Image (cartoon, rainbow, N blue to C red):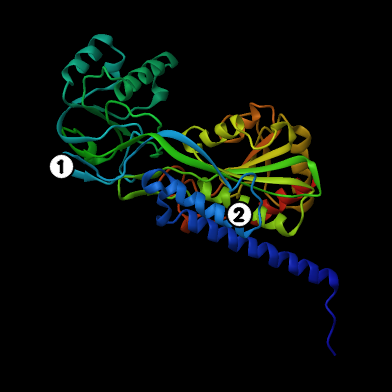
């Protein structure tokens, strides 16, 4: 005799199958966005536009509506890029871009062989010695050895920073370029400015001792008016008087030359995966309020897509009941951090309660305000918002190691459950 499976158990099994499917979808989104074909979602080979078109296609599949004729809100920005040659050799030893060194993102192109002048920290702190070293560096590369900031007073640290910034960015620096040695993790960025002198941050090892010769070939391309875009869609809810807005930036750092790719799996393909999963969920589970989904461009260049949106909104910002920004959603071993949690304590306490009741994440950690992602532009317009990111796990960030293959999505399912419950209770 066959035993009938209780309806409650069936419901639980169906729920878990649904969540499992969401995780598979998330993994596919991350793998796609962080693939070589998307060129790091930067501005070499229009990687950002490839990503935007993909997200727009996903919005269409999920049945999101658009505020205009399509999902794209265009904006322009200046940006410095390195599309091809990226070669650096020290004393004849070739270095690997992204592994052994980074180029300062605002550097111009450069080609040639240069002698060097070493500039120790002690010389930076002595104006007479500094002036002499700078004069002797004309037509050569300055080399700054590694140092520990903790060995110097606050006033000395300020002076060191001023000198290094002069060497890297000021047109009156007589040197042809600079090599800055470091023991720190190599972490890259983007630049909307092109400076007059190239600068390299080089990992310190045995091959970087007594650098006498620098051989370099770098090609850059600077865009005054690069065309980028935000991707925006929405789903109708039971109520249209207020809006829930869910956001994540899709851009990343792109490529440093033709070989060094910065995939950006955790930052922020994972956040886009959360955004699309939420759209997928609410497409089949009608939300309480009209819910807007925005994938922003230009975040890594200074929150540019978000800035453009709040200055050119597609709806009144005062209609936003609450906004949640997802940036770095791929780990969660140690829970999540909630920026603006101290400002919106009632909503933060709700997150904590849901997490405790459902036994989901290790912790929901509170933080004050911080202008460190796209939510900031809305926060400055008095829009109630959180910026949430996952804690623990892999430490790959703004480097070539932030890959989909090594991104665990450890707590993605529980994080997803927490957010849907939270949004439903707003």
Report the residue marked by disc 1.
92
> Image quadrant for the C terminus?
top right
Label 1 secondary element: loop
Please state which of residues 179 and 36 is positioned toward the viewer in this rendering: 36
301 horizontally vs 111: left or right: right
Please tell me how crowded label 2 is: few (under 14), some (14-19), or many (20+) other residues with Cα within 10 Å.
Answer: many
Report which quarter residue 141 is drawn in: top left
Q: Residue at left 42%, top 24%? A: 150
Q: Are marks 1 and 2 in contact (CB under 8 Å)?
A: no
Please state which of residues 370 and 335 is positioned toward the viewer in this rendering: 370
Q: Residue at left 44%, top 16%? A: 154
Label 2 secondary element: helix
Q: Is residue 386 visible?
A: yes
User: How many numbered discs?
Assistant: 2
Q: Residue at left 68%, top 54%? A: 414
Q: Residue furthest top?
A: 128
Q: Residue at left 15%, top 42%? A: 92
State the image coordinates of residue 220 (x, y, percent, origin top left): 29, 38
Decide which of tag 1 and tag 2 comes sooner along the chain. 2
Please state which of residues 84 and 136 is positioned toward the viewer in this rendering: 84
> Image quadrant for the N terminus?
bottom right
Q: Which mark is residue 161?
A: none
Report the residue marked by disc 2.
59
Please tell me how crowded label 1 is: few (under 14), some (14-19), or many (20+) other residues with Cα within 10 Å.
Answer: few
389 horizontally vs 92: left or right: right
Front of the two marks 1 and 2: 2
284 horizontally vs 217: left or right: right
Q: CA distance from mark 1 to mark 2?
A: 51 Å
């Amino acid at each position: 005799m066959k035993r009938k499976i209780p309806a409650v158990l069936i419901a639980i099994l169906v729920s878990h199958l649904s969540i499992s499917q969401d995780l598979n979808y998330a993994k596919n989104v991350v793998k796609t966005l962080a693939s070589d074909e998307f060129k790091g979602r930067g501005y070499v080979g229009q990687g950002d536009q490839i990503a935007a078109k993909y997200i727009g296609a996903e919005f269409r599949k999920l049945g999101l509506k658009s505020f205009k004729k399509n999902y794209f809100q265009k904006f322009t920005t200046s940006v410095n890029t390195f599309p091809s040659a990226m070669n650096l050799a020290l004393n004849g030893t070739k270095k690997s871009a992204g592994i052994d060194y980074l180029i300062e993102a605002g550097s111009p192109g450069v080609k040639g062989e240069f002698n060097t002048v070493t500039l120790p920290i002690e010389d930076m702190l002595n104006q007479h010695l500094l002036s002499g070293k700078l004069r002797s560096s004309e037509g050569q590369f300055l080399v700054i050895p590694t140092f520990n900031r903790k060995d110097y007073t606050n006033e000395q640290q300020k002076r060191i920073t001023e000198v290094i910034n002069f060497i890297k960015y000021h047109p009156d620096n007589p040197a042809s370029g600079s090599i800055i040695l470091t023991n720190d993790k190599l972490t890259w960025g983007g630049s909307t400015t092109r400076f007059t002198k190239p600068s390299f941050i080089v990992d310190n090892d045995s091959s970087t001792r007594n650098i006498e010769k620098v051989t370099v070939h770098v090609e850059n391309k600077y865009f005054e008016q690069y065309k980028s875009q935000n991707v925006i869609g929405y789903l109708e809810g039971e109520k249209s008087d207020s809006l829930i807005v869910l956001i994540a930036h899709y851009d990343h750092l792109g490529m440093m030359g033709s070989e060094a790719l910065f995939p950006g799996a955790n930052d922020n393909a994972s956040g886009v995966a959360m955004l699309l999963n939420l759209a997928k969920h609410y497409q089949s589970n009608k939300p309480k309020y009209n819910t807007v989904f925005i994938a922003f461009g230009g975040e890594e260049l200074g929150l540019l897509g978000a800035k453009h949106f709040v200055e050119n909104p597609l709806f009144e910002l005062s209609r936003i009941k609450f906004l949640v920004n997802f940036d770095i959603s791929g780990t969660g071993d140690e829970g999540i951090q909630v920026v603006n949690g101290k400002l919106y304590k009632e909503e933060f306490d709700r997150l904590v309660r849901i997490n405790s009741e459902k036994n989901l994440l290790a912790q929901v950690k509170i933080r004050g305000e911080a202008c460190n992602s796209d939510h900031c532009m809305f926060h400055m317009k008095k829009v109630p918002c959180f910026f949430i990111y996952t804690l623990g796990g892999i430490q790959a960030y703004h480097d070539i190691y932030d890959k989909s293959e090594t991104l665990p999505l450890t707590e993605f399912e529980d994080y997803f459950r927490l957010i849907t419950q939270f949004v439903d209770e707003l």
